[in-house]
Image (cartoon, rainbow, N blue to C red):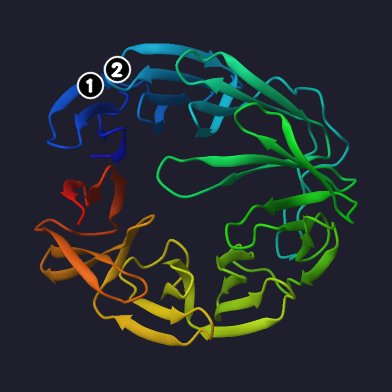
């Protein structure tokens, strides 16, 4: 078994085929596992996303050819439409968000991409114009398009979990003009002028816990500048002192806090001033939380799946409790964290953890649980793939 995705009350399972053949995809009812339809994908095709209504396949370009997106009716498997020379990156509100691979061809600048290497300085961005499209998921028709000129950068912020997708598009120019666009229409709904100018390596806006701030990494400089979106004023600067194998960067981890994970542990900074609030040795990864408590674990990103889960007090960084024997499997927004615990040779129990109280409610058991689990949730159901074995449970 290769992979599994959930959406619209359906479970899509991809199975390995002999060398030279495409992946065999089966679509089943998530409620009872009944097989609805199946299809063999082309060798270069892979499933990109599944919504309540459609299923999308991306074809990777070969020999210089552009990517293609094929969209199917999720209920029947019938092809609805296909469009070439686009690369999918998100969906929201019945819209498929994609970049026109060929639409901005020739709109390039003189600056080349410079690899970061051992230098902690922010890398130069690829200097080319981009054309972003919002497509109707049923017909493939272009609902709106936005051209982002050379030097400007767009950012699509995610909200919530599951299949909600980006909330809005932000666009920042080298002159510091920040535009916020509605994803339903593509229209500019707000514009701000920041006290910034220069080449942009990357930027972020709209972090749920710090909604009025914009984080900008200036190309060639070190670290990140934090701006107030309303006034445009520079609030503070975070300095990157050395390169990190983590790809370390600031992220909103709790209301009023940014966090940074590196080899030494987890550091929390005050979002208003940048002052260090606390440091937790050894706990590098934030798995989730409720604002008052952060659930964390030690180890490198993508590292040991069996690392223990610990609850930290978000105000002080002190360990409030350790969920002994429990390991992280995934997050169900609004419900808690999915954890698992070994109960013997290839046997395990699964539970849903309350971040605040630390209580774990057991909801499932598995007799074939090994390796790193990959879990998906939809409509109160959880599907987990562990060591090639797929199991589905109803969440409490």
Q: Residue at x 26, y 80 (%)?
A: 324
User: Do residues under tags 1 and 2 come within 8 Å of each other at their CB atoms?
Assistant: yes
For the question of whether residue 121 can be seen, the reply is: no
Q: Nearer the viewer, residue 146 or 56?
A: 146
In terms of depth relative to the viewer, which is nearer, 9 or 303? 9
**In the image: residue 146, left or right of residue 3:** right
Q: Is residue 293 left or right of residue 208?
A: left
Q: Residue at (36%, 71%) from the top-left corner?
A: 355
Query: Quadrant of residue 218 in the image?
Result: bottom right
Q: Residue 77 bears which disc, if any?
A: 2
Nearer the observer: mark 1 or 2; the answer is: 2
Answer with the quarter of the image where residue 331 lies.
bottom left
Whole-percent x and y of residue 48?
43, 32
Q: Name the residue nearer the viewer: 395 or 223.
A: 395
Which residue is the site of mark 1?
38
**Element on which disc 2 rests:** loop
Where is the C terminus found, in terms of image quarters?
bottom left
Which residue appears at 52% of the width and 15% of the height? 140
Q: Is residue 117 above or below residue 344?
A: above
Number of numbered labels in the structure image: 2
Name the secondary structure under disc 1: strand
User: Nearer the N terminus, badge 1 or badge 2?
Assistant: 1
Classify the position of the N terminus by image quarter.
top left
Q: Is residue 17 left or right of residue 85?
A: left
> Residue at left 71%, top 73%?
242
Q: Nearer the viewer, residue 2 or 69?
A: 69
């Amino acid at each position: 078994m290769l992979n599994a995705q959930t959406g619209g009350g359906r479970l899509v399972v991809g199975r390995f085929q002999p060398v030279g053949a495409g992946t065999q995809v089966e679509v089943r009812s998530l409620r009872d596992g009944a097989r609805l339809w199946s299809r063999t994908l082309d060798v270069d095709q892979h499933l990109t996303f599944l919504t309540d209504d459609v299923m999308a396949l991306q074809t990777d370009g070969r020999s210089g050819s552009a990517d293609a997106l094929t969209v199917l009716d999720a209920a029947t498997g019938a092809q609805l439409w296909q469009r070439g020379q686009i690369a999918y990156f998100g969906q929201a509100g019945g819209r498929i968000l994609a970049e026109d691979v060929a639409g901005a061809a020739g709109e390039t600048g003189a600056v080349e991409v410079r690899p970061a290497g051992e230098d902690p300085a922010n890398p130069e961005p690829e200097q080319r114009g981009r054309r972003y499209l919002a497509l109707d998921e049923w017909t493939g028709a272009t609902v709106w398009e936005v051209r982002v000129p050379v030097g400007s950068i767009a950012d699509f912020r995610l909200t919530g979990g599951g299949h909600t997708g980006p909330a809005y598009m932000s666009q920042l120019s080298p002159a510091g003009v920040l535009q916020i666009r509605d994803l339903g229409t593509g229209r500019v709904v707000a514009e701000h002028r920041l006290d910034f100018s220069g080449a942009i390596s990357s930027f972020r806006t709209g972090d749920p816990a710090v909604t009025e701030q914009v984080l900008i990494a200036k190309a060639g400089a070190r670290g990140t500048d934090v701006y107030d979106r309303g006034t445009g004023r520079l609030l503070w600067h975070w300095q990157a002192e050395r390169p990190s194998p983590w790809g370390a960067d600031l992220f909103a981890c709790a209301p009023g806090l940014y966090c940074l994970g590196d080899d030494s542990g987890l550091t929390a900074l005050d979002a208003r001033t940048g002052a260090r609030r606390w440091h937790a040795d050894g706990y590098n990864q934030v798995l989730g939380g409720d604002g008052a408590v952060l659930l964390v674990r030690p180890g490198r990103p993508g590292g040991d799946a069996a690392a223990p889960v610990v609850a930290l007090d978000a105000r002080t960084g002190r360990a409030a409790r350790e969920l002994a024997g429990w390991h992280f499997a995934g997050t169900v927004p609004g419900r808690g964290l999915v954890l698992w615990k070994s109960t013997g040779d290839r046997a395990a129990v699964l539970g849903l953890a309350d971040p605040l109280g630390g209580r774990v409610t057991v909801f499932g058991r598995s007799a074939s649980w090994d390796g790193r689990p990959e879990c998906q949730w939809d409509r109160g159901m959880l599907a987990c793939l562990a060591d090639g074995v797929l199991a589905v449970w109803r969440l409490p």
